[in-house]
Amino acid sequence: MKFNAANFKVKGDRTIWIIYIVLLFISLLEVYSAMGKMVYEKQGGDIIRIFLKHFGIILGGLVVTYFFHLIRYQWYSKFIKAAYVLSTILLGFTLLWGQFSTKAADRWIELPIIGQFQPSEIAKYVLILYVAKRLAILKDGIKERKNLLGLMGWVALTCILIFPENFSMSALIFVGCLLVVYIAGARLKDMMIVILPIVILAAFLFIFPQTVLERSSTWSNRVESWWYFDENDNTQANTAAMAISTGGLFGKGIGDTTHGRFLSESHNDFIFAIILEETGVFGGIFVITLYVVLLARTNKIAQKSKGLFGRYIVIGIGFMITLQAIVNMSVATGIIPVTGQTLPFISFGGTSFMITSAALGILLNVSASTKLDNKNEETDDMESSFEKLELENDNLNLEKDNSI
């Protein structure tokens, strides 16, 4: 069989592809530099082996992104309800029997070959696609309170199943979906009916830890240690602060981290602190700019998208990636308490990295169907018509569909 290079063309927004590749390159450099303590404590000092594992994960992420960016995003409309049901069942299973994982937190389960697996990562983006589909069907109907409350009920179900063991992930998903719904046209006064009970419940759990959930005491302690900061405490947050303070404007140089040797999560939750230590303020600004440009490009793609389903997919995925980056960088710099969220496409990871790579691939497929230069409008119209037919077919059954 003849090799055809045309079959391997890269589609979608080139700027997003460039940002993605740059973030992966930064990940290779900084994870290798930062994982000293983790390697010596958990991997027997074999830094090459763990680095090759990370390199393999990055290559796998690239393959996953490329694969998903070739799949027509309209295809997900057919199966997203089933995917939502499966992800919900998986979250429930994890909540009840996740203790069989080698990790202490119940949000992990152990799978053959794959190893430790975090179902909430899949549920996060499945929910985004599900919300995007329902919003595309409802159109201006989301302005009706009953429709908004009905949709947010399904969002709440996913968040409730994640909440007991991963408050930050649950909050991230909830806020991301709220932003998408608001942009879709939901009225703010109706959204407050959803937001206020959640805020009151969260405040109750932090003020009265262990009243409802055992793990709420952990959240409360994190907030307390962040609020009553003591520079003499031997905490990861303090070590990260020292790393940042020694970086200055230009940093100590790639590979010259000192404090990374004392951070058990320097390769993961606190990777941004190591970036600031080694590359300084300017290096940190560069990384922040990459995520800002990524969000700006997704916004432009959403504005040009002719189909509502594709538009809300792009908005949701763009917001989710950017919000997670903001949370991670805010933790590393001490702006908010420790949460455990990774820095997308930079932190060492498995489940999170792969699933986020798949989500980016879906976003890139939407951008490939949306010509920002307004060329090939005939193709765009055909894509929009395909999506419209899919959603109208679902809309016929919406009134009868009292369950997902």
Image (spheres, rainbow, N blue to C red):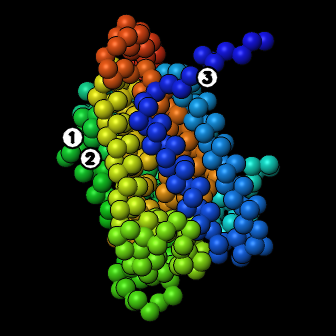
Regarding mark 3 in the picture, which secondary structure is present there?
A: helix
What kind of residue is marked 2?
Answer: Met
Regarding mark 1 in the picture, which secondary structure is present there?
A: loop
State the residue position of label 2: 191
Please provide percent x and percent y for residue 8. Answer: 61, 22
Residue neighbourhood size for the residue with mark 2, other residues' Cα within 10 Å, grouped as few (<14), some (14–19), many (≥20)? some
Between the C-alphas of marks 1 and 3, the distance is 44 Å
Instruction: State the image quarter where residue 400 is shown.
Output: top left
Q: Is residue 8 above or below residue 83?
A: above
State the residue position of label 1: 187
Instruction: State the image quarter where residue 260 is shown.
Output: bottom right
Q: Residue at x 37, y 74 (%)?
A: 248
Q: Upstream in the sequence, badge 2 or badge 3? A: 3
- The answer to whether any part of residue 129 appears in the image is no
In the image shown, does 182 or 28 lie closer to the viewer? 28
In the image shown, does 143 or 224 lie closer to the viewer? 224
Between the C-alphas of marks 2 and 3, the distance is 44 Å
Q: Is residue 176 above or below residue 224?
A: above
Residue neighbourhood size for the residue with mark 3, other residues' Cα within 10 Å, grouped as few (<14), some (14–19), many (≥20)? few
Task: State which mark lies toward you, 2 or 3.
Answer: 3
